[in-house]
């Protein structure tokens, strides 16, 4: 069988369905609201944060978040690759 067959044979589920399967709806809503509040506060105070930590601090934070995103992407790729070859 070819790769096209394997890619289209996986059951497709939306990410919201996957979240609901693992967490209660109330917990999802609370987490989303907390995220919105945190993002709003960070965006409103970004100039103050930038002045406080300075240019070097911003570069350090940028690198740390880059490593975190890289780790998440490797984990997702590995999980999907295992499903692909299984």
Image (cartoon, grey):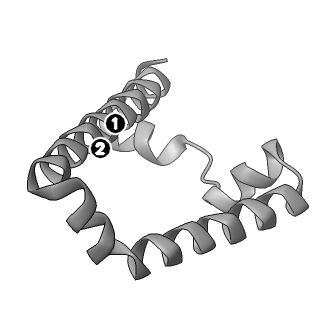
Q: Dot 2 surroundings within 10 Å: few (below 14), some, or many (20 or more)?
A: few
Provide the secondary structure element on which disc 1 rests: helix
Residue 83, position in %: x, y? 49, 26
Residue at (27, 36) in percent of width and height: 70
Residue at (10, 48) in percent of width and height: 56
Left or right relative to 26: residue 13: left
Left or right relative to 52: residue 80: right
Residue at (62, 57) in percent of width and height: 15
Q: Which mark is residue 65?
A: 2
Distance from Cα at disc 1 to Cα at disc 2? 5 Å
Q: Which mark is residue 68?
A: 1
Q: Nearer the viewer, residue 8 or 37?
A: 37
Q: Nearer the viewer, residue 43 or 25?
A: 43
Total residue callouts:
2
Q: Nearer the viewer, residue 45 or 70?
A: 45
Q: Nearer the viewer, residue 72 or 60?
A: 60
Residue 7, position in %: x, y? 42, 43
**Quadrant where the N terminus is found in the figure:** top left
Q: Dot 1 surroundings within 10 Å: few (below 14), some, or many (20 or more)?
A: few
């Amino acid at each position: 069988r070819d790769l096209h067959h394997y890619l289209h044979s996986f059951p497709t589920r939306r990410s919201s369905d996957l979240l609901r399967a693992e967490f209660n709806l109330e917990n999802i809503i609370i987490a989303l609201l907390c995220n919105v509040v945190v993002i709003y506060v960070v965006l409103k105070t970004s100039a103050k944060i930038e002045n406080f930590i300075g240019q070097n601090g911003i570069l350090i934070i940028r690198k740390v978040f880059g490593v975190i995103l890289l780790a998440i992407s490797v984990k997702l790729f590995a999980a999907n690759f295992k499903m692909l070859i299984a």
